[in-house]
Structures are given as C-alpha cells and as structure tokens.
Image: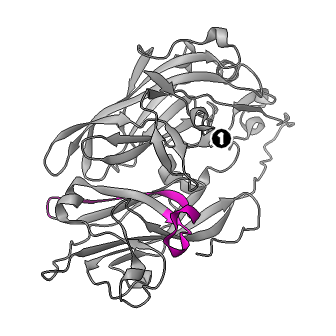
Amino acid sequence: MKSISPILLVAGSGVALAAPGPSLYQRGMSLFKRWDYDVCQKDCTLAGVAIPDNNNFQLPLEKNYPEQCPEIYLKEAGVTSRVCLDFVGHDVVFNFAPIPGYTYLNAAVGWKVKGNMIKPETWSAAPPPCTGEISCTPNASGDGGLVCKLPFSDILSVPPRTSTRDLLAGICPNADREALGFYFQFSGQVRCDEDSKISSLHQQYPCKSRDSNRQCTAWDTSYDYIEPTPTTTTTTDKPTPTTTTSTTKPTPTVCEFGTAFGYQPGKSQTLDTQPGQGCNRWGWYQTPTKSELRAGISGPLYVGAGRNDISKATQVGTWTATADSSGKVTVTYLVTPPYAIDEVHVDLSCLPIDKCAPGSYTFGNDNVGHATKYSTPALVYPSCPKGYGPALIIHAAIVQSSETSTCPEPVKH
C-alpha cells in the first residue's frame, strides 16, 4: 500500500513545550501559539535552534489541507473517531479519542523514519514492515481515550539521556526547512458496550477531492499510512543575563464565530418544514430509531448554512449520537481548532417539533468553557404517540481563537 501524507507539525518539539496530561481535545483553545516554549528561559543554550512549528498539520496528498486530528473508523459500525497528533516533552504523542458506546481493548502506532525530506536519497520505503510499534495506555483523564508516546531518542536511535539540543538537531536537520519525515499507522480493537461485539480500528484513507464546503467527495483507497513531515522555525530568543524575567506572551482572543447545527448526510430534514415556534430558520433535525442509535449515528457540524445551503457553510467539526443498552442517548461534539464550543443544546423529543429555539431544547449547557470536545449526559429516548417519530436536533454556539485583540465579524446565518 502507498502511504498517506499529512504533514505533522510539532506542538512542542521535545523541549517540554506543553505540560504532560490533557489531550488536544481537553486543552482546547490553549494551542494557538506558533510554539509555546520560552527557549531562553528554560535553556539559554537553545537560542537559535530550529524548533518544529506548533499546531500546523497539513496533508501533502490533499494539497496541504490542514488536519491536526486524522480520522479512524470502525468499518462494520460506520463509526468514526480521531487520533490527535501532539508533541509533549521529548515525545511524539498520539491521543486516541474515546468512542461513545465502545471500549478500547488495545491500540498501537506502527512507525518508521522516512528520512531527511530535502534529501530523497535518504528516504526509506513505505511500510510494511515498520521499524517498531508502540502500544497505547489509558489517558490520565480517564475519559476512555488512549495515549501513546514515541520518544525522540527511539526515532533517532540514540541514548535516552541525549541532550535536547542534539535531539532537536536530529529531528530538525535542515534549520528552517523540512524536518525528518515519518511513516505512522494506527490500529486497534474496540468492544461494543451494547452487544460485546469486537471491531477493528481502521485508518481513514486520504481525500482525493473536496467540494466547495471542504467536504471530502472521494477517497484514495490505495493509501493506508500517514506520512508526516514536520516543518521548523529557528528561534530568535537571545540568552539573558542572570535572572529570570519572564516574557508575557499575548493571550489569544476568543471570538464569536456562529451557530452550528448537526447534519446527517442523506438523513437530515430541515427545521423550516416544522410548524413550531421559531422553526422558520435554517438548521436540521434527525429521526433516528433506537436501533440506529445503538449502532451510532454521526455527521458534520456546520456553521453558516443559510437557507440550508451546505455549500455556504463552514464545517467546524463532527458529532455522534449513541444509545446504551437502556436506550439512554449521549451526544458527543468534536470540533477542530481554531474552533471551540461555547454552548451546546440538544433536543430529543417527538414530532411535530413545537419549538425550534435552542433555549427550549431537552438539554442545554451555556457554559461549556471553550472546549473542543463535549459529551452530554445520558438523555431519555422519547416514547412517541403512534404515527409520530422522534426528532433529534443538535445545536452549538461556536467560538474561534484570534491572535489579535480584535475579532472578525461572526457568521451571520
């Protein structure tokens, strides 16, 4: 098989750029600086050293489309999740997001160094075989996700006590140009909480083409590897005399972006077909059965789809809805930085819909705290009169991070 090629740009670069612990999902709006390590404050010998750039993941096979959290999926169930790539300390870190309705049995990352990306003569062939495989363990938050760590010293085949300067020189051999390239492959197994069926995790294929809304319309099934290539920037930090004056970096401004609704391709119906108060607006509802929810349903989160025109919208993330053995329903939101969640509202009731204003929905949380991942508590699946099915509305208020003190105009629709 060929290898998938998202560029993996480093959020930390082996110099303790981010404190160990919370994943990208939990840190949310905190990862927006180009890098977040004060080189001279920590180690003045690192001034002028090339450091991998922060939070800039791109896919060369997809015309450098940005993606920080590559998708994985359960083929049999049609359920998707993501693995967020991060750098913490001297490790490459892989955060496997929890999958509602499923329990991880195992997960692993196969890896191999491709070589110096500006010297094709150093490039190795794509796997198989991989050089090694790292196993994953439950993450510190206990939310059901997993974390795996690949030490820089293993990548470079050097002793663990190798200095940070030498580790960075190995990872970033070309100063401000491309760093080492890698091959990664995600794998694993999960067990369905409902029927105990075991399913295998698969890596999503790269996208061959996207529509005007940036949604993938075709996949290249000849690739099943990630081929990440970091880029780097040389630090300009200068050694400081004796003491410890810390430099305060500007805090990113959190700006309103717009209203999001969950959409289920081929299934959603528009709110403006309902007679209820406030339903003369854009947005969608789903009509899932209990069995469909037990298998799990999902779709994109769209902002700005005025008149329900998806071509005008911005996809800020995805949603999933699953039911447990008792029929209780959990909705999970997952958005991609620079976007984050400010409020969520979910309506799970019977048709016809009598009110479409989010404040009147079955569940609401108006203080999510700018998270990039949020799951509702278990909601009761409605018992509807004969001839009237359920209606599920998924709504969110979305914010975005700005490096300046001023905010752009929010999306109007």
Residue 339: image x %, image y %? 57, 59
Front residue of 239/314: it is 314
Front residue of 64/333: it is 64
Q: Which residue is mark 1?
A: 54
Residue 78: image x %, image y %? 30, 47
Residue 118 versus residue 51 in the image, above or below = above
Rendered image quadrant of residue 29: bottom right
In the rendered image, residue 319 lying in the magenta stretch gets the answer yes
Amino acid type, label 1: Asn
Rendered image quadrant of residue 349: bottom left
The residue sitting at 83% across, 36% down in the picture is 236
Q: Is residue 230 visible?
A: yes
Q: Say left or right for 72 vs 404.
A: left
| Secondary structure found at label 1 | loop
The residue sitting at 46% across, 27% down in the picture is 225
The residue sitting at 73% across, 57% down in the picture is 403
Residue 25: image x %, image y %? 48, 51
What is the count of numbered marks? Answer: 1
Image quarter in which the C terminus is found: bottom right
Image quarter in which the N terminus is found: top left
The residue sitting at 54% across, 55% down in the picture is 28
Q: Say left or right for 363 vs 71.
A: left
In the rendered image, residue 99 lying in the magenta stretch gets the answer no
Residue 214 versus residue 370 in the image, above or below = above
Front residue of 58/213: it is 213
The image's colour scheme reads one colour
Residue furthest toward the bottom? Answer: 277
Decide: few, some or many residues near mark 1? Use Cα within 10 Å; few <14, some 14-19, many ≥20: many
The span shown in magenta is: 302-326
